[in-house]
Amino acid sequence: MNVLFISEGRLKAVTAIHENVEPDDLVPFVVQAQDIYIQDILGTTMYNSLKTAVSASTLTAQEDVLIDNYIAPTTANYALYLALPTLNYKIANKSVLNPSSEESLNTGLDEIKYLRQSVQDTAQFYAQRTIEFLKANENDFPDYINPDSDYMLPNKRTQYNHGVYIPSAVGCYNYGQDTEKPLN
Protein backbone atom coordinates (compact mmCIF):
# COMPACT_ATOMS: atom_id res chain seq x y z
CA MET A 1 0.00 0.00 0.00
CA ASN A 2 1.25 3.45 -0.92
CA VAL A 3 1.32 6.13 1.74
CA LEU A 4 0.76 9.50 0.08
CA PHE A 5 1.62 12.86 1.62
CA ILE A 6 -1.08 14.62 -0.42
CA SER A 7 -4.71 13.96 -1.29
CA GLU A 8 -6.16 14.04 -4.79
CA GLY A 9 -8.20 17.15 -3.95
CA ARG A 10 -5.17 19.04 -2.65
CA LEU A 11 -3.08 17.91 -5.63
CA LYS A 12 -5.62 19.35 -8.04
CA ALA A 13 -6.18 22.47 -5.91
CA VAL A 14 -2.51 23.54 -5.81
CA THR A 15 -1.60 22.68 -9.41
CA ALA A 16 -3.08 23.19 -12.86
CA ILE A 17 -4.34 19.61 -13.02
CA HIS A 18 -7.93 19.66 -14.26
CA GLU A 19 -10.70 18.06 -12.19
CA ASN A 20 -11.47 15.52 -14.93
CA VAL A 21 -8.03 13.86 -14.73
CA GLU A 22 -8.51 10.42 -13.20
CA PRO A 23 -6.77 9.72 -9.87
CA ASP A 24 -5.38 6.47 -11.29
CA ASP A 25 -3.51 8.56 -13.88
CA LEU A 26 -1.90 10.64 -11.10
CA VAL A 27 -1.07 8.24 -8.25
CA PRO A 28 2.02 6.71 -9.91
CA PHE A 29 3.50 10.18 -10.34
CA VAL A 30 2.76 11.16 -6.74
CA VAL A 31 4.54 7.99 -5.59
CA GLN A 32 7.47 8.75 -7.89
CA ALA A 33 7.65 12.38 -6.74
CA GLN A 34 7.78 11.24 -3.12
CA ASP A 35 10.33 8.49 -3.77
CA ILE A 36 12.62 10.62 -5.92
CA TYR A 37 12.35 14.17 -4.61
CA ILE A 38 10.87 14.06 -1.10
CA GLN A 39 13.05 11.14 -0.02
CA ASP A 40 16.07 13.05 -1.38
CA ILE A 41 15.21 16.09 0.77
CA LEU A 42 14.31 14.18 3.95
CA GLY A 43 16.65 11.21 3.70
CA THR A 44 15.33 7.66 3.82
CA THR A 45 15.19 7.44 7.61
CA MET A 46 12.92 10.47 8.04
CA TYR A 47 10.98 9.66 4.86
CA ASN A 48 10.06 6.19 6.15
CA SER A 49 9.37 7.55 9.62
CA LEU A 50 6.90 10.12 8.21
CA LYS A 51 5.19 7.50 6.05
CA THR A 52 4.75 5.30 9.13
CA ALA A 53 3.36 8.22 11.16
CA VAL A 54 0.92 9.17 8.37
CA SER A 55 -0.26 5.58 8.08
CA ALA A 56 -0.72 5.25 11.85
CA SER A 57 -2.18 8.77 12.25
CA THR A 58 0.50 9.62 14.83
CA LEU A 59 2.00 12.77 13.32
CA THR A 60 3.34 15.38 15.72
CA ALA A 61 2.20 19.00 15.35
CA GLN A 62 5.51 19.93 13.66
CA GLU A 63 5.26 16.96 11.28
CA ASP A 64 1.74 18.10 10.37
CA VAL A 65 3.06 21.57 9.57
CA LEU A 66 5.93 20.08 7.57
CA ILE A 67 3.62 17.92 5.47
CA ASP A 68 0.79 20.43 5.00
CA ASN A 69 2.87 23.54 4.28
CA TYR A 70 6.02 22.16 2.69
CA ILE A 71 5.97 18.53 1.58
CA ALA A 72 2.47 18.59 0.03
CA PRO A 73 3.12 21.53 -2.34
CA THR A 74 6.55 20.13 -3.24
CA THR A 75 5.07 16.70 -3.94
CA ALA A 76 2.20 18.17 -5.96
CA ASN A 77 4.43 20.16 -8.26
CA TYR A 78 6.97 17.39 -8.77
CA ALA A 79 4.13 14.94 -9.47
CA LEU A 80 2.78 17.28 -12.15
CA TYR A 81 6.30 17.73 -13.53
CA LEU A 82 6.68 13.96 -13.83
CA ALA A 83 3.16 13.47 -15.24
CA LEU A 84 3.25 16.14 -17.95
CA PRO A 85 4.96 14.10 -20.66
CA THR A 86 2.50 11.23 -20.35
CA LEU A 87 -0.81 12.89 -19.52
CA ASN A 88 -1.22 13.58 -23.23
CA TYR A 89 -0.62 9.93 -24.13
CA LYS A 90 -2.09 6.56 -23.24
CA ILE A 91 0.02 3.42 -23.32
CA ALA A 92 -2.11 0.64 -24.75
CA ASN A 93 -1.53 -3.02 -25.43
CA LYS A 94 0.29 -2.59 -28.75
CA SER A 95 1.01 1.12 -29.09
CA VAL A 96 1.22 4.56 -27.55
CA LEU A 97 -1.92 6.54 -28.30
CA ASN A 98 -2.44 10.27 -28.48
CA PRO A 99 -6.22 10.66 -28.08
CA SER A 100 -7.77 13.91 -29.21
CA SER A 101 -11.22 15.41 -29.38
CA GLU A 102 -12.96 17.81 -31.70
CA GLU A 103 -12.95 20.57 -29.09
CA SER A 104 -9.22 20.60 -28.28
CA LEU A 105 -5.82 20.69 -29.90
CA ASN A 106 -2.87 18.55 -28.93
CA THR A 107 0.00 20.40 -27.32
CA GLY A 108 3.35 20.47 -29.10
CA LEU A 109 6.69 19.41 -27.67
CA ASP A 110 7.89 23.00 -27.19
CA GLU A 111 4.83 23.89 -25.13
CA ILE A 112 5.25 20.74 -23.00
CA LYS A 113 8.91 21.62 -22.39
CA TYR A 114 7.93 25.15 -21.38
CA LEU A 115 5.20 23.88 -19.03
CA ARG A 116 7.54 21.34 -17.47
CA GLN A 117 10.21 23.98 -16.86
CA SER A 118 7.66 26.28 -15.25
CA VAL A 119 6.33 23.49 -13.02
CA GLN A 120 9.87 22.39 -12.15
CA ASP A 121 10.75 25.96 -11.12
CA THR A 122 7.74 25.99 -8.79
CA ALA A 123 8.61 22.56 -7.39
CA GLN A 124 12.20 23.66 -6.71
CA PHE A 125 10.92 26.74 -4.89
CA TYR A 126 8.81 24.59 -2.56
CA ALA A 127 11.64 22.06 -2.16
CA GLN A 128 13.99 24.86 -1.10
CA ARG A 129 11.43 26.14 1.39
CA THR A 130 11.13 22.60 2.79
CA ILE A 131 14.89 22.38 3.34
CA GLU A 132 14.98 25.81 4.97
CA PHE A 133 12.11 24.85 7.30
CA LEU A 134 13.84 21.60 8.26
CA LYS A 135 17.14 23.37 8.93
CA ALA A 136 15.42 26.03 11.06
CA ASN A 137 13.53 23.40 13.05
CA GLU A 138 15.93 20.46 12.95
CA ASN A 139 15.65 19.83 16.70
CA ASP A 140 12.01 18.85 16.09
CA PHE A 141 13.08 16.22 13.53
CA PRO A 142 15.66 13.84 15.06
CA ASP A 143 15.59 11.54 12.00
CA TYR A 144 16.66 14.51 9.87
CA ILE A 145 19.71 15.41 11.95
CA ASN A 146 20.61 11.79 12.88
CA PRO A 147 19.69 9.62 9.87
CA ASP A 148 20.66 5.98 9.51
CA SER A 149 23.74 6.05 7.28
CA ASP A 150 22.73 2.83 5.47
CA TYR A 151 20.17 4.77 3.43
CA MET A 152 19.92 8.01 1.47
CA LEU A 153 21.05 10.92 3.61
CA PRO A 154 19.09 14.19 3.60
CA ASN A 155 20.05 16.49 0.74
CA LYS A 156 20.52 19.89 2.36
CA ARG A 157 21.92 21.62 -0.75
CA THR A 158 20.03 24.20 -2.77
CA GLN A 159 17.26 22.76 -4.92
CA TYR A 160 17.48 25.37 -7.66
CA ASN A 161 18.94 23.95 -10.84
CA HIS A 162 18.95 26.01 -14.01
CA GLY A 163 21.74 24.27 -15.88
CA VAL A 164 24.21 27.16 -15.73
CA TYR A 165 27.27 26.88 -13.52
CA ILE A 166 29.09 30.06 -12.57
CA PRO A 167 32.01 29.45 -10.23
CA SER A 168 32.06 31.76 -7.25
CA ALA A 169 35.67 32.81 -7.95
CA VAL A 170 34.94 34.30 -11.39
CA GLY A 171 35.49 38.04 -11.38
CA CYS A 172 37.01 38.00 -7.89
CA TYR A 173 40.53 38.67 -6.87
CA ASN A 174 42.53 38.59 -3.70
CA TYR A 175 42.40 42.13 -2.29
CA GLY A 176 45.67 41.61 -0.42
CA GLN A 177 47.72 41.13 -3.58
CA ASP A 178 48.37 43.90 -6.11
CA THR A 179 49.23 41.41 -8.86
CA GLU A 180 45.65 40.21 -9.23
CA LYS A 181 43.17 42.40 -11.10
CA PRO A 182 39.40 41.98 -11.25
CA LEU A 183 37.75 40.88 -14.47
CA ASN A 184 35.74 43.68 -16.06
Image (cartoon, helix red, strand yellow):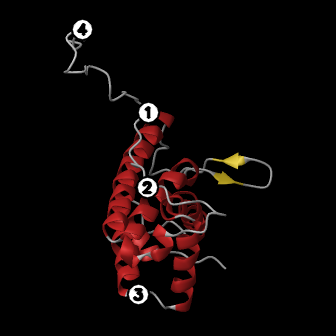
- The answer to which quarter of the image holds residue 63 is bottom left
Mark 1 element type: loop
Task: Classify mark 1: residues with Cα within 10 Å, few (<14), some (14-19) or many (20+).
Answer: few
**Residue in the image at 62% along x and 76% along y:** 2
Mark 3 element type: loop
**Residue in the image at 47% along x and 69% along y:** 144
Disc 3 and disc 1: Cα gap in Å?
38 Å
Q: Is residue 101 visible?
A: no
Of label 3 and label 4, which has the lower sequence position? 3
Q: Is residue 109 visible?
A: yes
Q: Which residue is mark 1?
A: 163
Q: Is residue 59 placed above or below 45 in the rendered structure?
A: below
Do labels 1 and 4 touch, CB within 8 Å?
A: no
Of label 3 and label 2, which has the lower sequence position? 3
Disc 1 and disc 2: Cα gap in Å?
19 Å
Task: Classify mark 4: residues with Cα within 10 Å, few (<14), some (14-19) or many (20+).
Answer: few
Disc 3 and disc 4: Cα gap in Å?
58 Å
25 or 140: nearer the viewer: 140
94 or 35: nearer the viewer: 35
Q: Which residue is mark 2?
A: 156
